[in-house]
Structures are given as structure tokens and as C-alpha cells.
Amino acid sequence: MNKGEMKPGAIAPAGSMHDLFTGSWRTYVPVTDLDKCTHCMMCWVMCPDSSILVEDSRKVGTDLDHCKGCGICAAVCPVKAIEMKLESDMSPDERKG
């Protein structure tokens, strides 16, 4: 399904938004201190964009093509391992999520 094919008020099928790269208008970037992260996966559960990258049941990063920078992941992190930073203040290497 393409973006323009949906009627107003329609419910999109699961997975249909994967091709929409919503991260392009983000202002803040979540930066995770993986040494501090306990991999409780609360950020994964609560992320409205399914942007938390996981391998072997452990958080490995953030999908910045889809992350809108809402900060929910940082708000629910019990050990405060995720910090929201202004994307404009970061170097390209720091924008890894």
C-alpha cells in the first residue's frame, strides 16, 4: 500500500508504514549508553515506531530512519541509559542512536 492510497480515517495494515522514513523530520536523537543499559527492553515495548534494534534479546541501537525522537524510550528507561540529544548539535558519528 502506498502512502496516497489510504482514505482518511482508514486503519493501516500491520507493517504498512515500514516504507515511510519518519526519522527525517526528527529534532532529538536517542543516544543509548549500552554499558549502562540492562536490556530490560522497556524501550522496545514502548517505542511507537518499532525503532529499537535488537539482536539476541539485547538492545543494539536505534533505527534512525524511523525514530521520530519522541523520547518515550528515554522516559521509560529504568536506569536512565538513554539520553535525548539535539540532532543539530551532534556529529554524524554520534547520530548512531
Image (cartoon, helix red, strand yellow):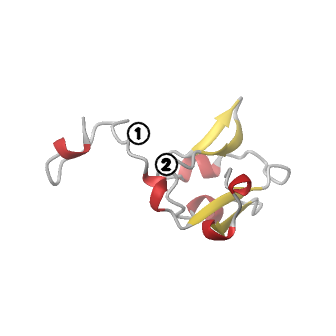
For residue 56, the mark is none
N-terminal-most mark, 2 or 1? 1
Q: Amino acid at mark 2?
A: His
Residue at numbered disc 2: 66
Mark 1 crowd level (few <14, some 14–19, many ≥20, 10 Å Cα): few
Query: What is the quadrant of residue 3 in the picture?
Result: top left
Mark 2 crowd level (few <14, some 14–19, many ≥20, 10 Å Cα): many
In the displayed structure image, the side of residue 10 where residue 28 appears, left or right: right
Residue at numbered disc 1: 18
User: Can you say whether 15 is above or below 44 in the image?
Assistant: above
- View extreme (top): residue: 56
Mark 2 and 1 residues: CB-CB less than 8 Å, in contact? yes
Nearer-the-camera pick, 47 or 20: 20
The percent coordinates of residue 28 (x first, y second) are 58, 66
Quadrant containing the N terminus is top left
Picture residue at 52% right of the left edge, 64% below the top: 70
Picture residue at 68% right of the left edge, 45% below the top: 61
- View extreme (front): residue: 92
Nearer-the-camera pick, 2 or 55: 2
The percent coordinates of residue 11 (x first, y second) are 23, 45
Picture residue at 38% right of the left edge, 39% below the top: 19
Nearer-the-camera pick, 70 or 78: 70
Picture residue at 49% right of the left edge, 48% below the top: 66
